[in-house]
Every structure is written in C-alpha cells, then in structure tokens.
Amino acid sequence: VKLRLGPRRMILVNHPDLVEEVLVTRNRHFIKHFALRMTQTTLGNGLLTSEGEFWRRQRRLAQPAFHRDRIAGYAAVMVEYAERMLAGWADGQVRDVHDDMMRVTLEVVAKTLFDADISGDSADASAAMETLMRCFTARVGRIIRLPERFPTPVNLRLRRAARRLDQILFRIIAERRAGGEDRGDLLSMLLHAQDEDDVRMTDHQLRDEAMTLFMAGHETTADTLTWAWYLLSQDPEVEARLHAELAEVLGGRAPGVADLPRLAYTEHVVTETLRLYPTVWLLGREAIEPCEVGGYRVPVGTTVYMSQWVVHRDPRFFDDPEVYHPDRWADGLAQRLPRYAYFPFGGGPRICIGNGFAMMESVLLLATIAQRFRLALAPGAMIKPLPTMTLRPDGGIKMVLAQRC
C-alpha cells in the first residue's frame, strides 16, 4: 500500500515475505525511520537510534549482558522485585495495573543491568518516562515539527522529563565510576570497554545507552503484562488454565529459572498477548539506497512500514485471529508459520537485543503475581489502546485485586 504524508513517501507492507525482505534480505538499504531519529536529542546515540559501525560496536559491547546464561541469573531479581510490589497490594484494592507494571519493570531493569536499586526514584522515573512517550507521540504526529530547542509546551515538558531521568542516570554512572569494581553487569561492561584507540566511553555515551535501555527495557514488558492482565480478566477459562498450571508446577512457592520449561501455558499466555497487543506495533525503515521490495521500486527517502498489529491479526496465518487463544501455540504453530507472520521483537540484525530477557521477565512476573492475586476489570474502566512509540492503554487500566493466597 503506497501512502503520502506531506513530502514523505510511505509504503505499508503486510505480508511476512515482504517484512523479511526489508528487515533481513535488504536491511543494508535501510535505516531507522524519521520518528526515531527525532528522539535522538533526548535518547542520545544509543542502540535504538544509532546506525552503522557505531551501532555495531555498541551492540557487540552490550550483547554479552543478554546471553542466555547471564539472563538466567537475573531471574531471582525479577521475582524479588515482583514480591516487593505485591507487599503493597491488598484484597479489594483498585489499582492502575499499568502504573504498577511500569514501576516494577523499571526497578528490574535498573537492578539487573546497572546493579542499581532505584525503588526510591521509581515513581518519579516512571512519570518522567510517561511524559517522554506522550511528548514523542505529540511531536511525531505533527506535520510541522519545530526543533526541540524551541520552547513549545511539548518541548518544555520533554526537557523537564529528560532532566529528571538524567539526574538518576548520571548519579548511577558517577557512583559506579567512583567504585571502580566490575560487578559483571551491563554497566560494568560498558564502563570498562575500550575502542581500538584505547578510548573508553564518556559519561554521556554511557548515559545514552542507559537511557535507551531504561526506555525500551521496561516500557515494552510493562505494556505486555498490562495487556495480559486485561485479557485474562476477560477470559475465565484461560485464567483457570493458568492458575492450574501454576498450582501444579509451583505449588505456592516462588518461580525460578528452572521452572520455565514447565510453565509452558504461562509462556503461551504471554506469546498470545504479544500477538493481539504487540507492544511494538509498527516498525519503519527509510531507504538510503534505491531498491525493490516484492518487485516494487522503493526510491531513496521512502519509509517502508511493517505493522505487527496488522500481520498478527491476518486470517491468512491465524485461525480466528481476533480471539485470545493461548493454546494455539501448543502444537508447534510457531514452526509452521511464515518466519515473519509473528515478529513482536522485530527481526534481522536489529532484532530486539533483550527479547529473551523480556520473555523470561514476563513469564516470571506473571507467575509470581497470578499465584497471589486475581485481577478483575474495575467497573466503568475504559480500555483504549494508544499507539505511541509502543502500544499502551490510554489512561492505564484500573483493576480490582482479589487475593488468592
């Protein structure tokens, strides 16, 4: 589908083979689209926004922190912070579950990747993240976009939110530089990394990577868990199946990494949530060289969009695509699908570096919380997906807690 918005040429592709062409086969013909480049003033030159050789270097430096064995070591921290959150929950409370998920996932990212306990700052940091997301969306949606240095109301809110996050991030970096020890986490790897000229990363380079991982590493999982609670509240049969598996596998104890292979239905709940409500709902790539995709000419400057929301609900690939049905993944569906009929974490060289981290965190937090509480949609709660940089519930989701044990 060809589109045009002002001077911008756009193409929407909605077949897995074409998605694969853009993300994999012809990935060197493309860079990230203009909307992400607009965030560079705030996010800096981190993994999400950088390109070329600089991106490849940074990806190589960060990759060890996301290896399977390293991720397995994060499991206990994930469960610990979920249990800390649950200590403040009580039977009959009405809570904004999106707000709770945002805080706990932010605390998990800070502790696992930066060995920093930001429990005292998580409310402020989460609110600042919320402001950033809304400001980014407001800027991208405008035909005429003034640079961030102009003191528009949106830009002023953006600056205040970024300053608050910078205070937290630069404090963490300063404390770690002063300590000097290698704690084996991502920040230690980045602090001690040197380039070919034996030059180490500056505080601002470290801040850019930390800001990117703070944003991407908690928002996506928080949104996924929030949509999972909503979907479970609407399907008692699926919820009962989840509770039955947790009772059989865990018997009331906290989950651990060794339990993951037996928590198959819990994982299917997460997988199906990501199908219906993909946190990353749209990817864009801008052509920097002329090429062809699916036999169609793509001129330089054209942005090619691929929507997980569209492809994941395509009846060519999924039976009853609008139905929440975790069991669809139980019989090897993932292996039978075209490679890019399901791509919640993107694909190709720039596939999300933290996809394994995000899946494990989602399963462990879901298991920890669902053993203790049922979450029912609060009376009068309005559910409206808001497509910002991620797919989040507009205004959060109010839910009533019912203690199970």
Image (spheres, grey):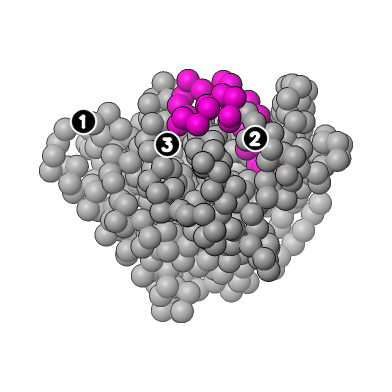
* Kind of element beneath mark 1: loop
Residue 88 at x, y = what percent?
41, 54
The residues bearing labels 3 and 1 have C-alpha atoms spaced at a distance of 24 Å
In the image, what residue occupies the spot 71% across and 57% down? 9
297 on left or right of 22: right
- Crowding at dot 3, Cα within 10 Å, few <14 / some 14-19 / many 20+, comes out as many
- The disc at residue 376 is none
- The disc at residue 79 is 3
Residue farthest toward the front in the current orientation of the protein: 405
404 on left or right of 380: left
Give, as a single range, the part of the protein colored magenta.
246-275
Residue 353 at x, y = what percent?
49, 34
Front one among 228 and 86: 86
- The disc at residue 242 is 2
Rendering quarter of residue 382: bottom right
Front: mark 2 or 1:
2
Front: mark 3 or 1:
3
Q: Earlier in the sequence, mark 3 or mark 1?
A: 3
Front: mark 3 or 2:
2
The residues bearing labels 2 and 1 have C-alpha atoms spaced at a distance of 40 Å
* Residue that mark 1 sits on: 182
The residues bearing labels 3 and 2 have C-alpha atoms spaced at a distance of 18 Å
Q: Main secondary structure of the magenta part?
A: helix
Please, what is the three-letter code of the amino acid marked with disc 1? Asp
Whether residue 258 is in magenta: the answer is yes
Front one among 76 and 373: 373
In the image, what residue occupies the spot 32% across and 52% down? 119
Asked if residue 35 shows in the view, the reply is no
